[in-house]
Amino acid sequence: MKKAIIVMVLATALGACSQTEKGAAVGGLGGAAVGAAVANDPVQGAVVGGAVGAVAGALIGHASESGQCRYRDRYGRTYIDRCPQGY
């Protein structure tokens, strides 16, 4: 039951994220899980794996975006518009 609630909360939270943010979150979680499973020291493996996974996931997520950026105003509302030149 607890796992189902955690999965639902994560899915809802990731629904408002950009592809870069989603990639970083999924990569970080996956990297931490794999790092903890294969390293001699599970904590150190989770930290290193999470960091590497988050960076890789963010890069992959950013590459999949189509020139559209997600912006947030000072009231917390998000909107999508074209990215600035060179982004």
Image (cartoon, rainbow, N blue to C red):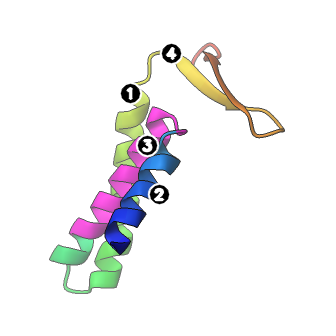
Binning the other alpha carbons within 10 Å of mark 1 as few (below 14), some (14 to 19) or many (20 upward) gives few
Magenta stretch bounds: 16-34
Q: Indicate the position of residue 51 as horizontal and vertical percent values.
A: 40, 61
| Numbered label attached to residue 54 | none
Which of the numbered marks, if any, corresponds to residue 22?
Answer: 3
Name the main secondary structure of what is drawn in magenta: helix
Q: Amino acid at mark 2?
A: Val
Q: Which residue is mark 1?
A: 63
Say what secondary structure mark 3 lies in.
Answer: helix
**Which disc is residue 9 wearing?**
2
Is 9 part of what is drawn in magenta? no
Q: Residue reaching furthest left? A: 38
- Mark 4 against mark 3, which lies toward the viewer? 3
Which of pointers 3 and 2 lies earlier in the amino acid sequence?
A: 2
Crowding at dot 4, Cα within 10 Å, few <14 / some 14-19 / many 20+, comes out as few
For mark 4, what is the residue?
A: 67
Q: Cα distance, mark 3 to mark 2?
A: 14 Å
Mark 1–mark 3 CB contact (< 8 Å): no
Q: Quick one: 79 or 42, which is closer to the camera?
A: 79
- Residue at image location 41% in from the left, 64% down from the top: 6
First along the sequence among labels 4 and 3: 3
